[in-house]
Amino acid sequence: MKNKADGTGGATFDRSKRTLPGELNVFFALVLIVTTFEALGWLLIGDSFLFNTRENVDTFFNEARLKIIILQVSIVGIIALGVTQVIITGGIDLSSGSIVGVTAMVTMSFAQVSIVNGNPNPKAIFLEQGWLDLPIIVPLVIGLACGIATGMINGLLVAYTRIPPFIATLGMMVAARGAAKWWSKGRPISFPTDEYAAIGKGLMPVLIFIALAILFALILKFTRYGKHCYAIGSNVEAARMSGINVERHLVLVYTIAGTLAAVAAIVLSSKNLTAQAGMGVMYELDAIAMAVIGGVSLSGGRGSIFGTVIGALIFGVIISGFTFLKLDAYYQEMAKGAIIVGAVVLDQWRQRRQTLGG
Amino acid sequence: MTRQVLNTEGLTKHYGGVHALEEADFEIHAGEHVAIVGDNGAGKSTFVRQITAVEQRTRGKIWFDGNEVNFAGPLEAREAGIETVFQNLALADDLDVPDNLFLGREKFLLNLGPFSILDYGGMRKATLDALMKTGVKIPSIRNTIRRMSGGQRQCVAIARTATFHSKLTIMDEPTAALGVQETSQVENIIRTLKKAGEPLILISHNMRQVFDLVDRIVVFRRGRIVANLNKEDTDQQEVVAYITGAKSGNGQANLT
Ligand SMILES: Nc1ncnc2c1ncn2[C@@H]1O[C@H](COP(=O)(O)OP(=O)(O)OP(=O)(O)O)[C@@H](O)[C@H]1O
Ligand SMILES: [Mg+2]
């Protein structure tokens, strides 16, 4: 009777019959997809997806490809961490891509150098004011403030006007994109300081993504904040009756999501050494897709950061798998759409089965 | 007369044109167990929602524990010492038993504001203690509420009120979904409260249960209190007559 300490009688409870956690299913899906690409690789183009087949490189795995995959998903993955929390509360955030755009523009304009190749920086935004070669802390603080402000507006709208999150963040999506274009009248902003350029260099985006993923995985699992996210997502009335300040919590959640989008913007603009008004277009959908693929339920209350990280990897594998198989980019986008819809269908199906006592 | 624990005066709630609760004058004293009965839609749950500040009342006054109170929300009512089993149970389906028992007042290992670290071990242990104490049977407290039967959910909600010391317990149809054994289990919990001298408001449609457990019966009809009867001075027939409207009267006039 190992289980005795776990309950107080009633029906017998067999721990071995407990259904696998959702994350494990998602992990199996990842393995399955990788295996499929591996098989297709040998069948269609006679090459391995996962393993190294080049004579002159002495590694077991195809490290170059794996690096590309994780680098590719890291930046959107950072956004997906925030989107995951929003979706767990039963909301949605459509504005993260636009927040990336406006934050990248604003931040970059405070991170510019004065002299490029011996000439004054031709792209300098604040040339007249002389705000060039500023210490790194200035663009970082301003960038994060952008994310906090936009996220907080989302949160206040969702919590206090009671308009659906879909509408509130759709408004922010359009407005923030407009702000990104207005900021420099559409001109790209380039030539950051060396310190700023170091943020997104090499594998830095991956490290930042992993660090933030671990941080928020712990927060969601072990803090009151996390517990209340799940409580609000599973039954907002119960959460309210239990004394949770739902409105204040939602403001915090959307603010954190906005802040994470701003972190992604900083990393992305640093990595690209430039910022453009169109940066981050459609990232919100990619981030939502990562979360949903990773088992985060769109109806709220269920999902985890770990699931989203695996969801992000699946996303990356599929994109790079299409490139690997030398399929056209058009197919990639169509497949992406199909995957998003498929993941939601799967989520609905899982829910029906659970409520019917599966 | 013993000390009043809760007292309402002219408590009224209108939902737009629906007059769900009209001018309710109600009182409960230290150690007293009072039943609220009435047909579906009589306004019983509405009354509870006004006292616990789940909703804001249209008008009326509430005194609790000697002071006039204006709770801003359910947390304040709870912190003041009112524990409630709501009719809709107010549980989070995707959380497990300890999470639900401690929802909104978690135990912490380290206080960091919103990011305070949860004391899972402590909450688990306290949950098992509470379930033992109340005799509630749950196969595994790690199961989410979603996977539980209606009766088990109800048990969790009841165990939640029993876990915390309160000055007043309110149960809105606590045995509505329970089997015979579980019902007597809950009735035992109520008797334990009685012995401990803790006051209780019990809402129930079960006349046998009401007459078994409480000292006084208050009848609601169409949003108004129509009778206020000591158990000794009445019988099931009279109570049913008030519920159906076959007999009518002013609640306050009956007692004294
Ligand atoms: N949020 C609301 N908006 C509008 N009308 C409401 C609302 N809540 C309750 N009512 C109405 O108020 C009246 C009283 O409802 P209440 O839930 O208090 O009944 P009750 O006595 O608890 O009934 P039951 O025994 O079925 O639980 C009903 O006519 C109901 O339709
Ligand atoms: Mg009711």
Image: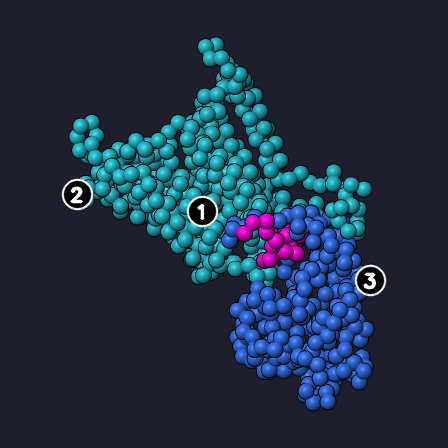
User: Which of the labelled discs sits on residue A128, or is there none?
Assistant: 2
> The residue marked by circle 3 belongs to what chain?
B
What chain does mark 2 sit on? A
User: Which is nearer the eye, B79 or A181?
Assistant: B79
**In terms of sequence position, does the residue under pointer 2 or pointer 1 come before the other?**
2
- Res. A3 image quadrant: top right
Q: Residues within 10 Å of mark 3 (few under 14, many from 20)?
A: few
Specify the segment rendered in magenta.
B94-111
Residue at the location (59% across, 33% down)? A27
**Amino acid type at mark 1:** Ala
Quadrant of the frame with the N terminus of chain A: top right
Quick one: which chain is blue? B
| Dots 2 and 1 on the same chain | yes
Q: Which mark is residue A257?
A: 1
Disc 3 residue type?
A: Val
Which label belongs to residue A117? none
Figure colour of chain A: cyan
Please give the residue where the numbered disc 3 appears in the rendered image. B180
Q: Residue at x 48, y 51 (%)?
A: A253
Give coordinates of residue A191: x percent, y percent: 26, 33
What is the quadrant of the C terminus of chain A in the image? Answer: top right
Q: Give the mark toward the camera: 2 or 3.
A: 2
The structure residue drawn at horizontal position 79% and vertical position 80%, both measured from the top left corner, is: B231
Picture colour scheme: by chain
In the image, residue A33 lies in the stretch drawn in magenta: no
Q: Position of residue A270 (x, y in %)?
A: 34, 34
Q: Dot 2: few (<14), some (14–19), or many (≥20) neighbours within 10 Å?
A: few
Looking at numbered disc 2 in the image, what kind of residue is underneath it? Glu
